[in-house]
Amino acid sequence: MDHHSQSAAVRARGIVKSFGTGDTQVTVLKGIDLDIYLGELLLLVGESGGGKTTLLSAIAGILDIDAGDIDVLGVPLSALPAGRRTQFRGQTMGFIYQQFNLLPALTAAENVAVPLLIQGVGRAEALRRARILLDRVGLGERAEFLPKNLSGGQQQRVAIARALVNEPRLLICDEPTAALDGPNGQKIMELLRDVGRSPDRCVIVVTHDSRIFHFGDRMANLTDGRIVGIERIGQEGTV
Amino acid sequence: MNYVALKMLFGDRAKYLMLLCGLTFAVMLIVQQGSIFWGLMMWSQANISNLNVPIWVTDPGIAQVDEVKPIASTGVDRVRSVDGVEWAVPLYKGLLRARLADGDYHQITLTGLESATLIGRPAQILEGRFEDILQPDAVVLDQWAVERMGGPAVVKVGTIFELNDKLARVVAIAKTQKSFTNIPVVYTTYERAMRYVPRERRTLSYVLAKAKDGVRVEDVVQRIRTQTGLGAFTEEEFGWKTIMWVLKNTGIGINFGTTILLGFIVGMAIAGQTFYLFTVENLRQFGALKAMGASTFTLARMILLQAFTVGLTGYGVGIGLATVFGFLTASGGNLPFAETWQLLLMVLVALLAICTFSALISIIKLARLEPAIVFR
Ligand SMILES: Nc1ncnc2c1ncn2[C@@H]1O[C@H](COP(=O)(O)OP(=O)(O)OP(=O)(O)O)[C@@H](O)[C@H]1O
Ligand SMILES: [Mg+2]
């Protein structure tokens, strides 16, 4: 695929973000330029504390940046007032966190339905669509289970179903396999890769785990607050 | 999202019960203390409410009902001549010693009612007939007199005792609201009361009156005051005057007031604090919802729903428990306990206010919350 002929789903330019003030101020992002294209799964790697999570939060519009511009699907985030930005996020993005962040009181199906409920979809319809998604991640049988009665891998699959239920065009994943063992991590990545391959969507995955590198299309390396290299990954899993 | 909010609330059974317990306890504490306080106040004006007449005419310098200041015997006629007065009757009220057959002495309040009308008579009779009070030497006791003077084995219908060396024969037992001083009440007619008490104390205590239909009681009371120079009060005014006197002069006001206020503050602090902690503990979940596109408005609605749900449940259970407590301890009228709708309404308003307040604090915290925390 020739990405450069397409318009980017995410277009980040000159992102700067500092935390703290005065002597204790640290500049975590020192001018990030990054494009993510539809139809790809982009891996974001880098040393711990390097700012990967910070960059994801900025792209998601849940963290204010000090300088730079971020366009998501052609919409400049900085131009949206806070309320509109929250709404835009709910309509266009899905999230998978390292900690699954499922609501413990809700069943698997209800958890998956939450983004739809937020969008104002009726409960019955939301649950119906949630069950379809759970089927797709292989948890159809477990729809009425509470998170505490599911294994870590199953919980993460519920989280993925939740991230996908409102058909987001941009799927943002922060170490989605960190809490999982090898085989479970592989299964999750297979699901994410399938999402990334649909032509009108893209996936960004932050990871440390070299065993899953081969699921990515490209890999960006964030070091010392800058993207120091973007490489295309071969089908056989070598970089 | 209301559904999600309620599930979040009920989902963590242990946390929900903690929260509910806190609120229930707070409500129970306040209602119980408030009811006891109000019960005491009812007792303090029992010697007014037991007579159930609309207007009390008194000495102009009267402080409270139990501190009788005699008025001139012409008082009844002067009140009768005031415009708008339908009727006016004399009332005698004074302390006397009763001597039982076994030689025991008891202090009693002798209450003399006008014989023609028996206005001021107790509404409920437990034994005998009140009208028999018109028979020679007849008196009627209230149930507290029976209790204080040795119980139903010693004092009953037919019992004969002495009042100031003159015979008194019990013909009936009446049920009355217990009074603050709990001095037994002995009813007789006004005329016979004059014979029981020593000569120098044979004076009119109060004039009881009623306004004509269609005339405002307040107007009549005002007219009695200006035309007779006596004190005149509606039943309610006199009750409040007595309550205020008790609050000011007995230490009940300060002592009980402080307890209630503390109970109120402690109760409300518990309620607010528990609910606030509940949201803080759920902050991460709310953050996740925010990251998924839930607006601050939606989250605020969820939190308010949670606050009101648990608040109203706690209110119901708390009032239930306080009422059961009151029923168990005070059903015989032996302990002061008056649960009024005003108190319940006040507690409801205060509770909803505190729930709203702590919900608002949580909401402000949520509005400021960076949903980025869920990534960490
Ligand atoms: N809210 C914040 N306040 C202050 N400092 C912060 C905040 N968030 C992040 N940081 C700092 O920014 C730096 C980058 O953090 P970030 O979480 O983005 O790193 P990361 O690359 O995701 O690390 P890891 O791989 O360990 O998850 C760290 O030094 C962190 O302490
Ligand atoms: Mg991180």
Image (cartoon, coloured by chain):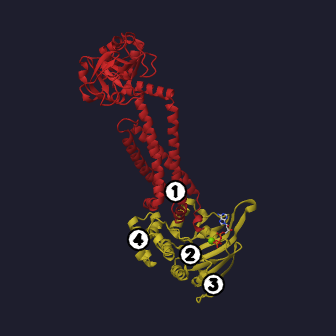
Label 3, on which residue?
A232
The mark nearer the N terminus, 3 or 2, is: 2
Few, some or many C-alpha atoms within 10 Å of disc 2 (few <14, some 14-19, many ≥20)? some
Amino acid on which disc 3 is placed: Arg
Q: Is mark 4 within 8 Å of ligand 2?
A: no
Real-space CA distance between mark 3 and mark 1, rounded to the nearest whole angstrom: 48 Å
In the image, taking residue B105 as reference, residue A115 lies left or right, namely right
Residues flagged by tags 1 and 2 on a common chain: no
Q: CA distance from mark 4 to mark 3?
A: 41 Å
Regarding mark 4 in the picture, which secondary structure is present there?
A: loop
Q: Which residue is mark 4?
A: A144
In this rendering, is residue B167 above or below B321? above
- Mark 1 — residue? B278
Q: Name the secondary structure under disc 1.
A: helix
CA distance for labels 1 and 2: 27 Å
Q: Nearer the viewer, mark 3 or mark 2?
A: 2
The circle on residue B135 is none
Query: Compared to B239, does B345 lie above or below?
Result: below
Crowd around label 3: few <14 · some 14–19 · many ≥20 (10 Å): few
| Chain rendered red | B
Structural distance between the alpha carbons of marks 3 and 2: 26 Å
User: Hey, which quadrant is residue B76 in on the image?
Assistant: top left
Whether residue B177 is visible here, answered yes or no, is yes
Task: Determine the residue positioned at 50% across, 68% down.
Answer: A102
Chain ID of residue with mark 2: A
User: What is the secondary structure assignment of the residue under circle 3?
Assistant: strand
Whether residue A2 is visible, yes or no, is no
Q: Position of residue B92 (x, y in %)?
A: 35, 17
Do callouts 3 and 1 point to residues on the same chain? no
State which quadrant residue B345 falls in.
top left
